[in-house]
Image (spheres, grey):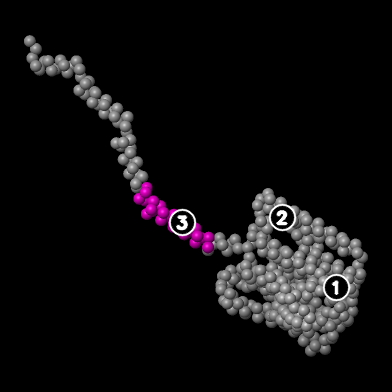
Amino acid sequence: MTTIRETYEIAADQNPQPEHATPKTNIRLSDAQNPQPEHVAPKTSIWHSGAQNLQPEHVAAKTSIWLSSAQHLQTEHVAPKTSIWLADAATDLLFCCGGLLWILFAATQSLDGQQQQKFLATLMMVGYAFLSIPHFGATLIRAFTSNFDKVRRNILIGITVPIIPLAALCSSTAGIAIVLCKIYLFVVVLHYAAQNLAILNRYFAKARFELRSVDRLSLNALVYGIAASQIINQLRYPALNVENFLGIPMPFWGPLPDWTAMLSGIFTMLSAVIFSAGILINFTRQGVVFPMPAAILLLSTLGLFVITGESSRILWWLMPAFMHGTQSFILAMVEGFGKENSNDRLQAPLPMRVWNGLPYYLGMAFTGLFLIWGTPTLLALSTSFSQQTLGVVVAIVSFHHFIADILLESDARAI
């Protein structure tokens, strides 16, 4: 007879799994079949809500901090480096790219008869006194404050010392004075072209616009080609000859044969086509856009030589003061105005810029006045003054000015 205890033990030995294994198996199956609702989903919802809570308070704040820092850095560092102007847009457009010249030219064209003559005479007198004469001093101050090497420094001193004795020698003979002033009237046209090219190269550098060798060569050929055409026309047409230069009669050296003008025109046109094609190729292949200040200055330069007739004569009377002279002041302000703090001064408000630049302008003005008027006065005191002295002095000082500019530009390319 089997007891109750024995019956329980036999049942346990024959069927051990339904009580122990099955519950464990059911638990594992439920875990494996539905892990996400009990464990993963809560974690996912926790992290999701945490990210939502963190983002408005921390991530957005960090993003705003980085944006603020980027804007701050761009304002302080990137903007000045990427400026395409030498000074600023308004200053460059008026005084570097020819804006002031074309405004005054348009004003003279709106007048006629005596009104035009009086207005033009006033402009020439003001421009000569306050712009043309001081611009000689601007170049001289830039040259003597530049970090020239020994060779350039010796050349500069060598051409400065003999100005007075050379003026006395050349003004003592009428024939020498006429030849000297006649050559000056030709070379000054090339000088105007050279300064415009120098400013074009500065605009290319500011915009990080790289010209291929063929493009740079064709640009130089274009600008000097149209300048040469102007000189050739002076030698072909008596009407374009300057008859009198500061009291010295100027003879007509010509006429040159017609083929010289034809050859000059073909050369200029080919240069324009090659340069334009190069700029177009750079734009289509690389998306490189020609700098706007350089384009405006180049158009102004071409306009000086394209306009003909009486309008051309008026334009060339105004250009030495109201384009070439003002360009010299901008270059002096940017490159000789104390390079260590010139950017800060140029970014100051306009009244402050005028106030800061006044001592520098006065220095240029007095230097120019001494060169142009002081030299003839000294010659007059030494009884070496003659009718052609003033013209000779202007020509000699101008040649000195041309050489100093060449030294400055060669030094700029060497840096």
In whole angstroms, how far apart are the C-alphas of marks 1 and 2? 34 Å
Q: Marks 3 and 1: which is nearer the front?
A: 1
Looking at marks 2 and 3 on the same chain, the residue that comes earlier in the sequence is marked by 3
Looking at marks 3 and 1 on the same chain, the residue that comes earlier in the sequence is marked by 3
In whole angstroms, how far apart are the C-alphas of marks 3 and 1? 65 Å
Looking at marks 1 and 2 on the same chain, the residue that comes earlier in the sequence is marked by 1
Q: Is mark 3 on a helix, strand or loop?
A: helix
Whether residue 198 appears in this view of the structure is no
Whether residue 89 appears in this view of the structure is yes
* Residue 272 at x, y percent in the picture: 78, 58
In whole angstroms, how far apart are the C-alphas of marks 2 and 3? 39 Å
Instruction: Indicate which disc residue 279 carries.
Output: 2
Q: Name the residue under label 1.
A: 240
Q: Number of callouts in the render? A: 3
| Magenta residues, start to end | 51-75
Determine which quarter of the picture holds residue 19.
top left
Q: Amino acid under label 1?
A: Leu
Q: Is residue 56 left or right of residue 245?
A: left
Residue 93 is a magenta residue: no
* Residue 32 at x, y percent in the picture: 32, 29
Look at 63% across and 65% down and name the residue there.
85
